[in-house]
Amino acid sequence: MNPPPPLVVEDLTFRYRDRGSPSISSISFELPAGHLLLLAGSSGCGKTTLARCINGLIPRSYKGELSGRILLHGQNAAGWPLARISQLVGTVLQDPERQILGTRVLNEVAFGLENLGLPRVEILERVDRAVEHLGISALRDRETHNLSGGEKQKVALAGVLAMRPSLLILDEPLASLDPASAQEALALVRRLIDEGMSVLMIEHRVEDVLRIHPDQVMFMSEGRVRYQGPVAGLEHAVDYREVKLPAEMVIARAAQEPQAQFPSPAIRRSLGLARPPLVQFEGVRFGYDAADSVLHDINLEIRPGEVIAVLGPNGAGKTTLVKHAIGLLKPTAGRVLVQGRDTHELSVAQVASTLGYVFQSPSHMLFAPTVREELAFGPTNLGHTPDLIQQEVQEALKIVNLTGLEADPPLALSFGQQKRVSIAAILAMRSRILVMDEPTAGQDFRNYMSFMDSILAMPGFEAVLFITHDVDLAVVYATRVLLVSQGRIAADGPPEEVLADTGLLTRCRLVPTSLLHANLERLPRTGRFVRAEALARV
Amino acid sequence: MLVTWRYRKRRSLVQSFDPRAWIIFYLCFMGVTISFWDVRILAILFGLSLGIVISSGLTWRETRRAWLFIGGFIIYFSLFTFLTGRGGMEFYTEEHVIRNVQASFTLFGWRPVLHITVERIFYALSMLVRVFSLASMTILIPYSFNPAQYGVTFRGLGLPDKIAYAMDLTMRFVPTYARDFQITMDAQRARGYEIEKLRGGLLAQVRKLAPLIVPVTIQAIAGSEDIIDAMDLRAFGIQPRTWLEELHYRPRDRALIVAGVGCFLFSLALSIYGVGTFWVPEALKSLPLL
């Protein structure tokens, strides 16, 4: 007789105590040993709730009404203590920064084993095996704080594997990784599966996961399973606007649908060519200490009408570069001119009227009791008059489509609305250039595409610059790409030129995507890069 | 970088002992020091703490800021006590004047007088030496103890697992929160916020710090859910845990604890019998009374 599968979920429904309706309803599936199940769906579809039910956090840490059964290796796990579940089900959460608990890699990997009260000798042996297995033995005695994002993710995985689970739940493991690190992480997961591990991977970047050939795909929306089966059926079952599918799949689907209209960008390149540059970098060099230089000899100009994508791997110097433009950092050699004035002579506040910087997470900046006060904060700091501020706030609210929410507390809004408030806060200062750090972070595919569409359609900014490691975002939206690698500009030009050099991309730890390939193939006919849906008409 | 760890492995007297033994010795030293007001005994204790600092392998460069900050603070308060003469009133009933210095100006018809007395000088001196010995021993701690051993040290001192691990977690998340703080600071500066321009009373200033405090707090609260999940998922707090880091008392550690506790008990006994109270040289007591 075959052994029972590591995971069977039967008719699972769960409602959080403080919510009116269930977050997941009637979910049933089976995950055999050595299989990869990809679970996709947009934010709030119930993916994480399902994961919490399987790993035991529900109902132990999150209370509510649970019905249905979860069988681990054929046994009903209801009523098991977390210590027992954690030895069968390992979970790696989205943000490695918050789940690494040890100051050193050794302590981090040993954490779960220490909690199980195992003898020291066994803990050390298991830790050594886990780090060796993932090829990170060299990190064993390093401090966790100094690791890169990819290394942190591997250390978190090692900490889970050391507990020797037979089922692994990975909750958006790629979210904070650059493309090359994401690929390495995926290859590692594939190896574990081939060795017999069962993996449930939650990810809305479906395209990336398809590279490691999931055995099954499950697509959820509004707490229910909409599709469950082989990858091949995904194309027809899933809305390509909700999860990121490979470009060819999207093209095939879009060709059968009526032609879609996309908002046209409000920024017009032709307007800016004759006008003086807004920002100039002249031989900029920067280092936090004399021996260690982060930026080397940067020369560039930002002109009105440009939509610039700053691409590059984690740690390449992208953020440091942008912080120079907004005056948060001053070059150690060379100079940065903002509207002709050297940033050495300007305060950050003075630069803010030209460049507005929106940080990755809105919760890093939102603080005021009402949206109105939040938006008035910037202009007040810049010394605008109360009448002008009122006008600026109203205009900004209108542009980001949040009129009517003036009196609401920004921190009580949804994540997407908070992102809009953070953009409006910059708009209200009448900054001429919008600078965004990872604008898509923390949002699912549908949300971030509509977010980018609406930002570029907004009147008010003369140029937009965004930092990203999502190549497709540059393909679809940028008119110019700055490729940063090891503190230097590795390439600067239109996306059709810079991104065509796939060798250069690989050297900069970026991975050419299916959308890029599809665009490159059709470039002689299109003349420029466009989104996948538009390629369907070529 | 906002946070850099002060701890390094050094060849030093402090680090040659088990951290638990040192913490016990440190607490005893504190106890001994606060048992006395006699500047002669305090000077010996100060000499001892200075010796320990010198043997700790710390350089002036790495500790300069800590010394200047704490030193400035102590000197300021000792001087303040001396000038007002309000500090040691409970120790002496009469004061012997060395000199009375009259101010050359008057305030609303009152001419301030500074009485330089033997008692005030010796009180300020005792306070200075006393606090400096405590500070010297305290400054050593972050430089000498491995943050990775904080948890096991406190566990070894008898605190429960959960509280002891909280020490480890604090050390782990200090850099994370420092990074969040830096990001928020940058985000608000990019909106024209200038922390240098804080004005107004204390309450108004605190209110003006809201753009920093609110986001950092929200981030910390939001992040803590993940931290708790990560701990629960790896079976934290379900049963008594093994601590990977091991600490073993050696004879020298036991000797240090015995010496520390012995000295403390002895000092306690002495102070109960009134030995080591506030002292001024007999010879100076012939000076005129205030």
Image (cartoon, rainbow, N blue to C red):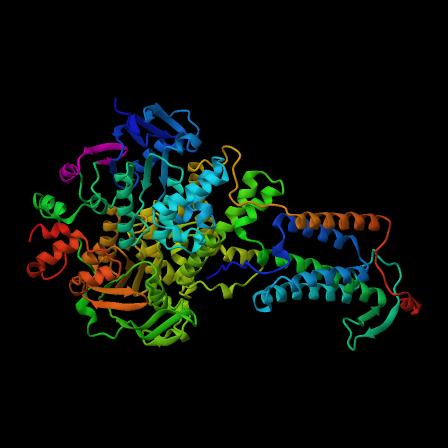
In the rendered image, residue B221, in percent from the top left (x then y), is placed at 46, 45
Locate residue B283 relative to residue A496 in the image: left or right: right
In the rendered image, residue A453, in percent from the top left (x then y), is placed at 22, 53
Examine the rendered structure and indicate whether residue A51 appears above or below residue A369.
Answer: above
Q: Could you tell me which residue is drawn at 32 percent across and 63 percent down?
A: A316
Q: Could you tell me which residue is drawn at 7 percent across and 43 percent down?
A: A256
| Residue A101 seen anywhere in this rendered image of the structure | no
Q: Dividing the picture into quarters, in which one does residue B105 lie?
A: bottom right
Q: Could you tell me which residue is drawn at 25 percent across and 64 percent down?
A: A483
Q: In terms of depth relative to the viewer, which is nearer, A430 or B1?
A: B1
Is the N terminus of chain A in the top left, top right, bottom left or bottom right quadrant?
top left
The furthest residue to the top:
A1
Q: Is residue A229 magenta?
A: yes
Q: In terms of depth relative to the viewer, which is nearer, A402 or A196?
A: A196
| Residue B172 seen anywhere in this rendered image of the structure | yes
In the rendered image, residue A516, in percent from the top left (x then y), is placed at 16, 56
In the rendered image, residue B96, in percent from the top left (x then y), is placed at 89, 67
Examine the rendered structure and indicate whether residue A415 appears above or below residue B49.
Answer: above
Locate residue A504 relative to residue B11 in the image: left or right: left
Q: In terms of depth relative to the viewer, which is nearer, A503 or B33?
A: A503
Q: Is residue A318 magenta?
A: no
Residue stretch rendered in magenta on the structure: A217-237
Locate residue B189 relative to residue A49 in the image: left or right: right
Locate residue A164 relative to residue A240 in the image: left or right: right
Q: Dividing the picture into quarters, in which one does residue A460 lie?
A: bottom left
Q: In terms of depth relative to the viewer, which is nearer, A312 or A59?
A: A312
> How many numbered discs?
0
Q: Could you tell me which residue is drawn at 87 percent across and 49 percent down?
A: B273
